[in-house]
């Protein structure tokens, strides 16, 4: 017998289940049906994790609009564009001074 992930391996030779195929979808459905839905954390374990790690919430780290706008200019691609602008201006000034 193969493991659950074996069918998704390109080396699996005993099943024609490839990701996206009908056999693969049927296999995943069968595995989902076999999995009991009552498994989960006990109340004591949940309370322990809540005390240790806190609530499962995202922190509200709202940044001001001006900062979000300013950060757009220091990403890698805009920096490359800024460097290209500086080089182009330097070449234009040098060319204009030779005339």
Image: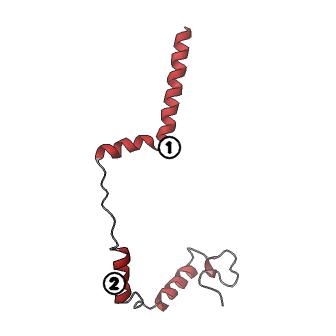
User: Measured from the top left, where is residue 10 in percent x and y?
Assistant: 67, 74
Residue at left 52%, top 25%? Answer: 88
In this view, 82 is above or below 32: above
Image height check: is 35 above or below 97? below
Q: Position of residue 37 (x, y in %)?
A: 41, 89
Classed neighbour count for the residue bearing mark 1: other residues with Cα under 10 Å, few (<14), some (14–19), many (≥20):
few
Residue 76 lies, with reference to residue 6, above or below; the image says above
User: According to the image, label 1 marks what residue?
Assistant: 76
Q: Name the residue under label 2.
A: 47
Labelled pair 1, 2 in contact (Cβ < 8 Å): no
Quadrant of residue 8 within the rendered picture: bottom right
Q: Residue 63 carries which label?
A: none
- Whichever of labels 1 and 2 marks the residue nearer the N terminus, that label is 2
Neighbor class of circle 2 (other Cα within 10 Å; few <14, some 14-19, many 20+) is few
Report whether residue 19 is seen.
yes
- Quadrant containing the C terminus is top right
In the image: residue 54, left or right of residue 24? left
- The CA span between labels 1 and 2 is 44 Å
Nearest the viewer among 42 and 95 is 42
Task: Provide residue 67's location: percent of width, then percent of height.
Answer: 33, 45
Name the residue at 49% across, 85% down.
29
Residue 7 location (% of width, % of height) = 62, 81
In this view, the residue in front, 6 or 40, is 40
Q: How many labels does the image show?
A: 2
Of the pair 64 and 32, the residue shown nearer to us: 64
Residue drawn at the location 50% of the way across and 27% of the way down:
86
Residue 37 is left or right of residue 21, and the answer is left
* SS at mark 2 in the image: helix
Q: Residue furthest front?
A: 52
């Amino acid at each position: 017998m193969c493991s659950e992930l074996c069918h998704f391996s390109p080396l699996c030779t005993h099943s024609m289940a490839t990701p996206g195929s009908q056999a693969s979808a049927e296999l995943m459905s069968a595995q989902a049906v076999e999995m009991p839905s009552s498994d989960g954390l006990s109340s004591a374990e949940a309370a322990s994790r809540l005390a240790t790690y806190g609530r499962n919430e995202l922190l509200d780290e709202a940044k001001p609009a001006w900062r979000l706008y300013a950060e757009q200019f220091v990403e890698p691609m805009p920096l490359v564009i800024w460097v290209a602008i500086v080089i182009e201006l330097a070449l234009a000034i040098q060319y204009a001074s030779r005339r």
